[in-house]
Image (cartoon, coloured by chain):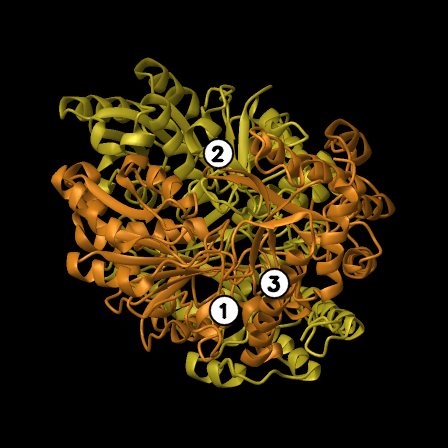
Chain colours: A yellow, B orange
Amino acid sequence: MADSKPLCSRDGDPMAAEALLRDVFGIIVDEVIRKGTSASEKVCEWKEPEELKQLLDLELRNQGEASEQILARCRAVIRYSVKTCHPRFFNQLFSGWDPHALAGRIVTESLNTSQYTYEIAPVFVLMEEEVLKKLRALVGWSSGDGVFCPGGSISNMYAVNLARYQRYPDCKQRGLRALPPLALFTSKECHYSIKKGAAFLGLGTDSVRIVKTDERGKMIPEDLERQIGLAEAEGAVPFLVSATSGTTVLGAFDPLEAIADVCQRHGLWLHVDVSETWRRGLRLRSSQLTRLCSAHPRADSVAWNPHKLLTAGLQCSALLLRDTSNLLRRCHGSQASYLFQQDKFYDVALDTGDKVVQCGRRVDCLKLWLMWKAQGGQGLERRVDQAFALAWYLVEELKKREGFELVMEPEFVNVCFWFVPPSLRGRQKCPDYSERLAKVAPVLKERMVKAGSMMIGYQPHGTRGNFFRMVVANPALTRADMDFLLNELERLGQDL
Amino acid sequence: MADSKPLCSRDGDPMAAEALLRDVFGIIVDEVIRKGTSASEKVCEWKEPEELKQLLDLELRNQGEASEQILARCRAVIRYSVKTCHPRFFNQLFSGWDPHALAGRIVTESLNTSQYTYEIAPVFVLMEEEVLKKLRALVGWSSGDGVFCPGGSISNMYAVNLARYQRYPDCKQRGLRALPPLALFTSKECHYSIKKGAAFLGLGTDSVRIVKTDERGKMIPEDLERQIGLAEAEGAVPFLVSATSGTTVLGAFDPLEAIADVCQRHGLWLHVDVSETWRRGLRLRSSQLTRLCSAHPRADSVAWNPHKLLTAGLQCSALLLRDTSNLLRRCHGSQASYLFQQDKFYDVALDTGDKVVQCGRRVDCLKLWLMWKAQGGQGLERRVDQAFALAWYLVEELKKREGFELVMEPEFVNVCFWFVPPSLRGRQKCPDYSERLAKVAPVLKERMVKAGSMMIGYQPHGTRGNFFRMVVANPALTRADMDFLLNELERLGQDL
């Protein structure tokens, strides 16, 4: 019986637990932070699934293992994992890292609390409020509400749920069957989470009306107006427009001012999904870039993911609201008496857990707060400057080379382009050109991954065949990395 | 312009970044792991919100700060945070820690990847599959599906969404308005996330029919049968029963066999919310405890939170499915072409991201996998033995003391009891006894938090006034901690 020996480690020895953690931390510094960010090391160590299963020995058994074996397992996990902080990982918007954000994340993990009551998360309740206030100020709001969500897709769902609740509070109790058919509007370039969310929320994907975009991928306000009319003519009630600032593939910015006008005319909730950027705000005062505006004060809600370009670490997704009527709490609250006791000895308005549809909620504010404290707004702004400067550099270099073709001039850090291999150059007029060009990216992707030299994403888009989408996000990138990208594609594709 | 100097740290110095992380890790070891788990230190350092705001200096400014200041901030964050790994933190089900799980969490944070494609998360795609397979085996399934979700509430929502989709696949496209009114059933002791989820999913809270419970808090199958009949008579279509194994407050186990019979008779999806325990499975072969069965092979889905009694760390929530028809992917998939390209060079079935409604998804399997490897099934089972043994010890000790009254004999690690202060002893017959007794817990709670000596939750429940809910979860607990709990309540309440 347990009369004295705690079981906090396998042998009940706190010193052993501490030693294990020190060793694991040492491995992380060596393998992830040092090697994992070194351009002279591989960005990934490709293995076929069956081989990787063998190498990892994944099976969970009845017998425990000794510390040395656990350390070997940590090394193997790191070895075969993709190094997303590596300067040649261009595959996702969350590439790169920030040491202060990582420090905040490790502190968060060690404190292991849930962001629902002041009682057990006093620091983080106050800190989340402060961080959200700052993010709102960057949108242009002096008041409002908000919450960190488990990812941008769920932030978007929150916005849709809040918009329908605001218009039809009955919905919470009586459900969608008590409501007229609803319609929401977004462009065909929007993130796929809008449709996923509509299905999950019971609205159905048909309730999402797709607005046309111009040749740059921006929503056309006139078509939005037209779609609203069409929906109404079909008996549906328009309630929300989801605009996007920095679309996933092209990095396009919807014209928020014009869209806000349409929303105002029709009384619609304006949500702005800035999941793919955090541009406005920190960049607000920059002359060069004010033509882009990613989060508009006339919006009702903004979804913003500092885990992308801000490298706060997965996940850090804020939903910001202009609302000051306690909409979040009214829409989501259920007053669970075991958690949100009303006879507590402190102000129970500090128990923010009833604002959300989750119960336990991870602490996602510390990593952003600590990074911001360390870098200052200035430092973060400098990063965006650098990302833009590098993106423009890449575009210029790319234009100088024969084998590269821009999909369009970028206005954001997404640079979309084709690599045209030697055998296809000058053959644009051949009937099978597009078809053959579309097959190039997958081949190059396989080669780069198997070589471990870099990773960059590709996709088809509308009528366009596969092209690469480069995202300049990692704050550690330099011109040399841009040159490498182009050289490496040439090297990998020279025989095609 | 950025031609050479990376901005990965404020001064662009990788060595400084590494040094910062080493220092932060040292602080964590000293302040969280060593002091934070020491019974001679405080479990919390209470401050009024306004004072705490001042102490933390939360404001985010334009200027960055030097490393020494960042380290001081980390120390302050830890100092004023509640120590959930402390042996006197009895406040939540996720108390305590496991060094291997924490190691896994820190590795996860440092690798910073998203669990959506094999391309960028090869290790974790395979590992999640293996962990889910093992968890399913503990439920009694040799096949099936599953996914880790951001918390148990969202796992429960997934189950409800899958159940309605299975019955009415049209729902995904056409929404709930195309369906008849639906009804789902759960007991009044269920977790509050069932109602929250029903509202969020567009069903409305009215669609949740509350089934009566017996005096122990267990769902009454006959009343379930009756409620199903009532719902049908009102024109609703029953589609799901959500049973609970280990209810939040009382720790009650619904009678799954009888409920499964009802579900089978009516063709309903049986979901089991084992968010508050992981009992069956690991405890399957234990003689003493087989009368409790927390995850039943006849269930269609099981929500299971290893971040609670298993101390895997927030969050680790598995949704397990009996389904082998690819229901998750059919229900949630949207085939985003920029992420789930079908012309990849490997088997795209390994890209599991389209099973979920999120886009980016945190890696939640490594912490559980690493802990399981280290402790073995045996070690984890031993922990449950110890938790139960300590809970029984607490019950016996509590019965010996004058000032304590059990709410009921526990059958799980939740021990619910009143502390009856000296002035109320022997006055059970007084008309204001219950009212006065209900005021005791909040006062004691305030005193213990302000003293920093321990934390334990209380709540009213049905017609019962506030009582304490002790959860024996932290694997480091000993008999001495149980004695301390009783002594400390006596000390804090001696003048009441």
**Mark 3, secondary structure of its residue:** helix
Badge 3: residue crowd in 10 Å (few <14, some 14–19, many ≥20) = many
Horizontally, residue B173 falls left or right of residue A279, namely left
| Subunit bearing disc 2 | A
Q: Where residue A7 sits in the image (x, y, percent)? A: 69, 72
User: Mark 3 and mark 1 in contact (Cβ < 8 Å)?
Assistant: no
Q: Nearer the viewer, mark 1 or mark 3?
A: 3
Image quadrant for the N terminus of chain B? Answer: top right
Q: Where residue A417 sits in the image (x, y, percent)? A: 43, 52
Mark seen at residue B81: none
Q: Which residue is identified by label 3?
A: B391
| Subunit bearing disc 3 | B
Which amino acid lies under the numbered mark 3 shown in the image of this protein? Ala
Horizontally, residue A328 falls left or right of residue A35, namely left
- Between B306 and A250, the one lying in front of the other is B306
**Mark 1, secondary structure of its residue:** helix
Which amino acid lies under the numbered mark 2 shown in the image of this protein? Gln
- Between A243 and B132, the one lying in front of the other is B132
Mark seen at residue B124: 1
Is residue A271 shown above or below B329?
above
**Mark 2, secondary structure of its residue:** loop
Q: Nearer the viewer, mark 2 or mark 1?
A: 2
Q: Earlier in the sequence, mark 1 or mark 3?
A: 1
Badge 2: residue crowd in 10 Å (few <14, some 14–19, many ≥20) = some
Which amino acid lies under the numbered mark 1 shown in the image of this protein? Phe
Q: Which residue is identified by label 2?
A: A335
Q: Where residue A400 sits in the image (x, y, percent)? A: 51, 52
Q: CA distance from mark 2 to mark 1?
A: 37 Å
- Between B173 and A470, the one lying in front of the other is B173
| Subunit bearing disc 1 | B
